Image: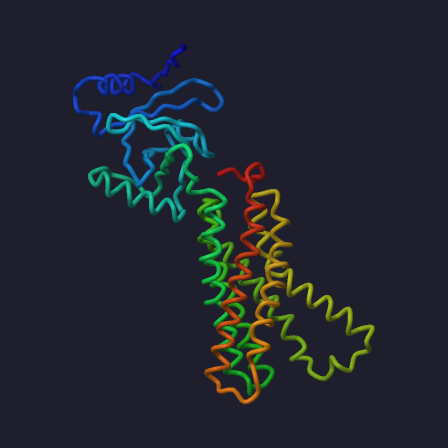
């Protein structure tokens, strides 16, 4: 039987690890982390200050710029840790500042070690026991995406729904301004909710960039969709050979606008970003189809305004859920392992 020999990176670490093996009581406060270097293949042992977080163990990386060991965990990597006298084996991965998960991990760590000074710029290494689904996995991302994006799109859709109700008897110019403003709001809300989820996987993604791109895509789509109203009878007077390509081009712009604008941001992180353009288009076609299928049979002449609004809200919720489900399915393909463009 061959026993793996682990080496400490310095004299101080060696002394601390030696002290852990003595009956000093340090084992209740200090842990020992062991891993194999990705590039060097060396077996390293480090003294760390761990905190339990449910089934996981969290280790803070203080002064990360001056240390290199944690870089082995930029992507999931096998690790063992001794905490409270017990050895645990699992997968470690770095959690970077600027993500929702980092905020959650930092709060848990501070609760476990209230006297330890920390900085919001410090990354953490989360160690998940073998056999557990990684917190940052694509499966979890898809579930999180569906819930939050459904809510975001539903809330965002309320803006054009309200604007359309308020401007039903208004002039073309007033309606155009109101609906474009509503489209900007819808895109901003949807983009913000989407970006907050994406940041759990892409820590360098800027929420404002994704939100701005989504808002711009929403305004473009609504601008094209409102053109028939602005042109009025002039459009219906066009010959058929002009109407058909114009309608087709407008439909394509409306369907692809959002995905293309978001692609300009997503392409920095994955070489599969073009899939997102198609996924977004398919999602919106499916979502609008679902909205029509739900509302058309329910909307009837002579209904009260509250009932009309209630039916519209129901249709909007169904549309939001369909869009979230379809885009979530494509997102797991876009962010599949092995296709990064910008490493975390």
Instruction: State left or right for residue 325 relative to residue 102.
Output: right
Quarter of the image where the N terminus is located: top left
Give the percent coordinates (x, y) of residue 216. 56, 62
Give the percent coordinates (x, y) of residue 136. 44, 42
Give the percent coordinates (x, y) of residue 5. 37, 13
Which residue, as the protein is rendered here, is positioned at the far left? 24
The residue lying at 34 percent from left, 18 percent from top is 8
The residue lying at 45 percent from left, 48 percent from top is 199
Which residue, as the protein is rendered here, is positioned at the far top? 1
The colour scheme applied to this rendered structure is rainbow
Instruction: State left or right for residue 64 relative to residue 273.
Output: left
Instruction: State left or right for residue 113 relative to residue 233.
Output: left
Question: Count the marks: how many?
Answer: 0
Give the percent coordinates (x, y) of residue 123. 37, 38
65 w.r.t. 213: above or below: above
The residue lying at 64 percent from left, 49 percent from top is 274
């Amino acid at each position: 039987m061959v026993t793996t020999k682990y080496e400490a990176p310095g004299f101080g670490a060696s002394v601390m690890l030696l002290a852990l093996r003595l009956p000093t009581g340090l084992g209740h406060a200090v842990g020992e982390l062991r891993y194999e270097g990705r590039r060097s293949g060396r077996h390293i042992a480090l003294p760390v200050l761990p905190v339990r977080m449910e089934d996981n163990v969290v280790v803070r990386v203080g002064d990360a710029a001056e240390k290199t060991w944690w870089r082995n965990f930029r992507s999931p990597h096998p690790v063992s840790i001794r905490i409270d006298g017990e050895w645990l084996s699992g997968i470690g991965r770095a959690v970077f500042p600027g993500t929702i998960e980092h905020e959650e991990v930092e709060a848990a760590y501070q609760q476990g070690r209230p006297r330890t000074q920390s900085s919001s710029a410090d990354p953490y290494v989360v160690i998940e026991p073998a056999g557990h689904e990684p917190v940052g996995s694509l499966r979890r991302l898809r579930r999180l995406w569906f819930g939050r994006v459904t809510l975001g799109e539903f809330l965002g859709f309320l803006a054009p729904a309200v604007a359309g109700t308020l401007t039903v008897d208004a002039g073309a110019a007033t309606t155009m301004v109101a609906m474009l403003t509503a489209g900007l709001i819808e895109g901003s809300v949807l983009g913000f909710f989407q970006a907050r989820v994406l940041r759990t996987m892409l820590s360098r993604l800027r929420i404002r960039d994704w939100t701005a791109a989504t808002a711009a895509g929403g305004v473009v789509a609504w601008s094209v969709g409102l053109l028939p109203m602005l042109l009025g009878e002039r459009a219906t007077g066009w010959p058929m050979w002009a109407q058909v390509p114009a309608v087709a081009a407008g439909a394509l712009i409306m369907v692809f606008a959002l995905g293309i604008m978001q692609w300009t941001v997503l392409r920095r992180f994955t070489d599969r970003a073009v899939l997102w353009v198609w996924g977004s288009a398919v999602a919106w076609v499916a979502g609008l189809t679902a909205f029509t299928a739900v509302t058309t049979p329910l909307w009837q002449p002579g209904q009260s305004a509250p009932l009309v609004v209630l039916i519209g809200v129901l249709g909007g919720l169904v549309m939001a859920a369909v869009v979230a489900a379809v885009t979530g399915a494509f997102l797991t393909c876009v962010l599949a392992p092995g296709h990064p463009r910008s490493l975390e």
